[in-house]
Image (tube, rainbow, N blue to C red):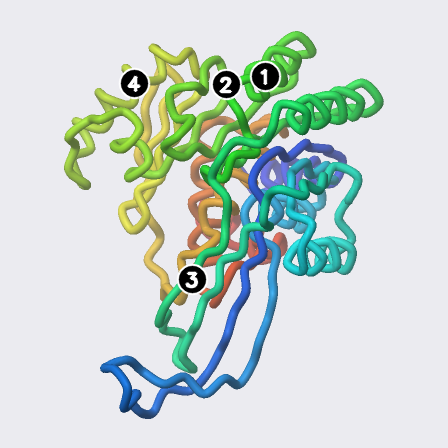
């Protein structure tokens, strides 16, 4: 791959449309100073200096696609609560498509509350969530809405973003994945444990290392690349994925398409915060694959993108210009 080919792939991003289906959330931050311990318990006292709400989960994937130049159609379910209103306001402010966001009266909006010290150190995270599957009626409404978007638009990619909060049911995935196969639309999955074995016949399957060993039950040690290669290739064949792509955090990424396997070490960076890096990786990998990049180019690009967002505190989308610069510097 040369610099002109990289430019062509990045140019294609701006012509692409993708559907994102999955669990969304509000990433809420309290930033503050810590200079003493509480007299009530051996815990730090945080003097709050800033509050901020950001879009997380599948919404962060949509933001990453938008940042790369593509148009995302986001589908999810939120609660009829204050957090849901905050979520919709952020969606509006960021210029994301809102028609695929459904509200359920009997579910809370997922909120991840993070308290972070001035130096960027996470002190504690408090989650508000529901992990049960959405009701069948809501599932049917989501499926019908997704079908309409597929019928009325040229869709280049469908991404399933699973955080184990219940929006993606096995039936929803199977229905939409079969529809995508019939229309030759590639699908990508970022899985969690609950549905791990339900994902079959996807084009791209991208767990991280912990998700892979939890989902498969393989007793692998991190750094055992030969063991990972064997297990990942066997699982790819069993589940009929075209590509399996396992992220290994500080050790890089592993990718296999059944004909060849490649391992890419991580680029050494200053790590400020790893939250949201997986969202960036699945976004970049999916678009790159749909844009015609080879699986090696896709792995390299998404590996670099994941490292770039880890340099910034909090959940943030990738910077397209910075990623393009890094790609050209790396080849």
Which sits earlier in the primary sequence, circle 1 or circle 4? Answer: 1
Measured in 3D between alpha carbons, the distance from the residue under mark 3 to the one under mark 4, in whole angstroms, is: 37 Å
According to the image, label 1 marks what residue?
Answer: 177
With respect to residue 180, does 110 lie above or below?
A: below
Percent position of residue 19, x then y: 68, 32
Which sits earlier in the primary sequence, circle 2 or circle 4? Answer: 2
- Residue at horizontal 38%, vertical 20%? 197
Measured in 3D between alpha carbons, the distance from the residue under mark 2 to the one under mark 4, in whole angstroms, is: 15 Å
According to the image, label 4 marks what residue?
Answer: 233
Residue 123 seen in the current view? yes
* Mark 1, secondary structure of its residue: helix
Rate crowding at label 2 as few (under 14), some (14 to 19) or many (20 or more) other CA atoms within 10 Å: many
Rate crowding at label 4 as few (under 14), some (14 to 19) or many (20 or more) other CA atoms within 10 Å: many
Which sits earlier in the primary sequence, circle 1 or circle 3? Answer: 3
* Mark 4, secondary structure of its residue: helix
Q: Are marks 3 and 4 in contact (CB under 8 Å)?
A: no
Q: Are marks 1 and 3 in contact (CB under 8 Å)?
A: no
Q: Are marks 2 and 1 in contact (CB under 8 Å)?
A: yes
Q: Are marks 3 and 2 in contact (CB under 8 Å)?
A: no
Q: Are marks 1 and 4 in contact (CB under 8 Å)?
A: no
- Residue at horizontal 69%, vertical 27%? 142
Measured in 3D between alpha carbons, the distance from the residue under mark 2 to the one under mark 1, in whole angstroms, is: 7 Å
Q: Nearer the viewer, residue 281 or 218?
A: 218
Closer to us: mark 2 or mark 4? 2
Percent position of residue 302, x then y: 48, 42
According to the image, label 3 marks what residue?
Answer: 126
Measured in 3D between alpha carbons, the distance from the residue under mark 3 to the one under mark 2, in whole angstroms, is: 33 Å
Closer to us: mark 2 or mark 1? 1
Which sits earlier in the primary sequence, circle 2 or circle 1? Answer: 1
Rate crowding at label 3 as few (under 14), some (14 to 19) or many (20 or more) other CA atoms within 10 Å: few
């Amino acid at each position: 791959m040369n610099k002109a080919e990289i430019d062509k792939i990045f140019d294609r991003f701006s012509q692409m449309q993708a559907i994102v289906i999955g669990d969304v959330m509000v990433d809420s931050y309290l930033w503050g100073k810590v200079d003493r311990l509480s007299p009530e318990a051996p815990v730090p006292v945080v003097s709050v200096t800033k509050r901020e709400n950001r879009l997380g989960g599948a919404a962060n994937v949509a933001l990453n696609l938008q940042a790369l130049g593509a148009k995302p159609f986001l589908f999810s379910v939120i609660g009829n609560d204050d957090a849901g209103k905050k979520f919709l306001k952020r969606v509006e402010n960021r210029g994301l498509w809102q028609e695929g966001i459904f509200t359920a009266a009997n579910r809370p909006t997922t909120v991840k509350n993070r308290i972070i010290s001035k130096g960027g150190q996470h002190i504690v995270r408090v989650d508000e969530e529901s992990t049960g599957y959405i009701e069948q009626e809501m599932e049917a409404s989501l499926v019908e809405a997704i079908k309409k978007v597929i019928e009325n638009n040229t869709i280049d990619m469908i991404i399933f973003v699973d955080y184990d909060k219940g929006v993606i049911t096995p039936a929803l995935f199977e229905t939409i994945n079969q529809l995508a196969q019939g229309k030759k639309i590639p699908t990508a999955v970022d899985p969690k444990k609950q549905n791990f074995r339900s994902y079959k016949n996807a084009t791209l399957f991208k767990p991280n290392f912990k998700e892979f060993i939890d989902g498969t039950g393989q007793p692998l040690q991190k750094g055992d690349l030969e063991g990972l290669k064997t297990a990942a290739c066997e699982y790819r064949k069993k589940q009929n994925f075209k590509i399996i792509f396992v992220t290994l955090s500080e050790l890089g990424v592993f990718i296999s398409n059944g004909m060849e396997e490649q391992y890419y070490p991580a680029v050494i960076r200053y790590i400020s915060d790893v939250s949201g890096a997986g969202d960036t990786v699945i976004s970049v990998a999916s678009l790159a694959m749909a844009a015609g990049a080879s699986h090696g180019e896709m792995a390299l690009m998404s590996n670099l993108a994941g490292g770039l967002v880890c340099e910034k505190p909090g959940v943030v989308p990738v910077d397209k210009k910075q990623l393009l610069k890094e790609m050209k510097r790396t080849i």
